[in-house]
Amino acid sequence: MKPSTTIPLAIVLGGMIVAAAVYVSVHRPERSTSSGQGNPADVRPVGPNDHILGNPAAPVQIVEYADFDCAYCKSFSTTLHSVIASEGTNGSINWVFREFPLTEIHPTALEDAQAAECAAAVGGNDAFWKFADLLFANQPADPQNYGAYAAQAGIESDAFATCLANASSTVSARIMADRANALAAGARGTPYSLILVRGQSPIVMDGAYSYAAVEQLVNQALRSAGD
């Protein structure tokens, strides 16, 4: 091999190896039975009523549609916590959680989503994230234990129980709105995530990506955002 070609060839091979590593690191999402294509551009803009971890005004946002009974969502939640802890310390990135209960394949997915939304309604944003972590940590969560999880998250028990007992009128509309937007934005399973940078097309993550893969896409988004 001629020396002049050795370095370029090594670069090409290295790129192929990295690309292959990113591909095999993705766990494909658990699928719903919904049909249609959807368009990532139809993702609902992030607003003050969303569940946001990190700086609400961050230029880069990861919007995740997830199901608390989805095993891949559990592992991806750990990944995103690590991403926010390392990449979000300067306020440049946040994580937005939206409900996408796969009721077709997970019998208690809707109940989990209702409990999480009641945690938010009663205890606020911080309580939501604590409760969400407990649902994933105890997956599959037993609905009989929702009250105990709420207590661990510091949520007032009576108000939480009242919200949960009236979930069809208190939080179900929000959950169904999240699910409808997930489908409109192209989700057919969980986890389904979009990296948003203002004025640019969303970057799609269809499945549970590895930390390295998410970090690579986040850094790409930060560069495009001028951060």
Image (cartoon, helix red, strand yellow):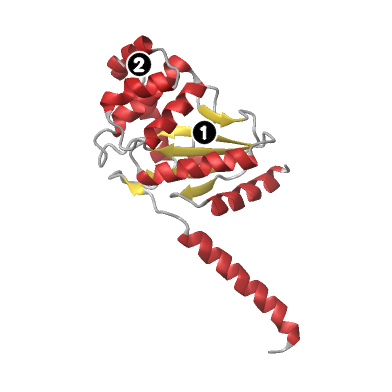
Q: Secondary structure at mark 2?
A: helix
Left or right, residue 138 beside residue 5: left
Q: Which residue is at the front of the view, 76 or 220?
A: 76
Q: What is the number of the mark on residue 70?
A: none
Q: What is the number of the mark on residue 170?
A: 2
Residue 213 lies in quadrant: bottom right
Residue type, numbered disc 1: Val
CA separation in Å, label 1 and label 2: 21 Å
Mark 2 Cα within 10 Å, few/some/many (few <14, many 20+)?
Answer: some
Image quarter of the C terminus: top right
Question: Does residue 112 sit above or below 65 in this rendering?
Answer: above
**x, y (%) of residue 80?**
52, 42
**x, y (%) of residue 100?**
37, 36
**x, y (%) of residue 48?**
55, 22
| Residue lying farthest to the top in this orientation | 158
Q: Which residue is at the front of the view, 159 or 45?
A: 159
Give the mark nearer the N terminus: 1 vs 2: 1
User: Which residue is located at x 44 percent, y 21 percent?
Assistant: 120
Q: Secondary structure at mark 1?
A: strand
User: Which residue is located at x 63 percent, y 30 percent?
Assistant: 55
Question: Does residue 56 sit above or below 182 in this rendering?
Answer: above
According to the picture, the residue beneath numbered tag 1 turns out to be 96
Image quarter of the N terminus: bottom right
User: Which residue is located at x 42 percent, y 22 percent?
Assistant: 152
Mark 1 Cα within 10 Å, few/some/many (few <14, many 20+)?
Answer: some
Left or right, residue 107 beside residue 27: left
Residue 183 lies in quadrant: top left
Residue type, numbered disc 2: Thr
| Residue lying farthest to the bottom in this orientation | 1
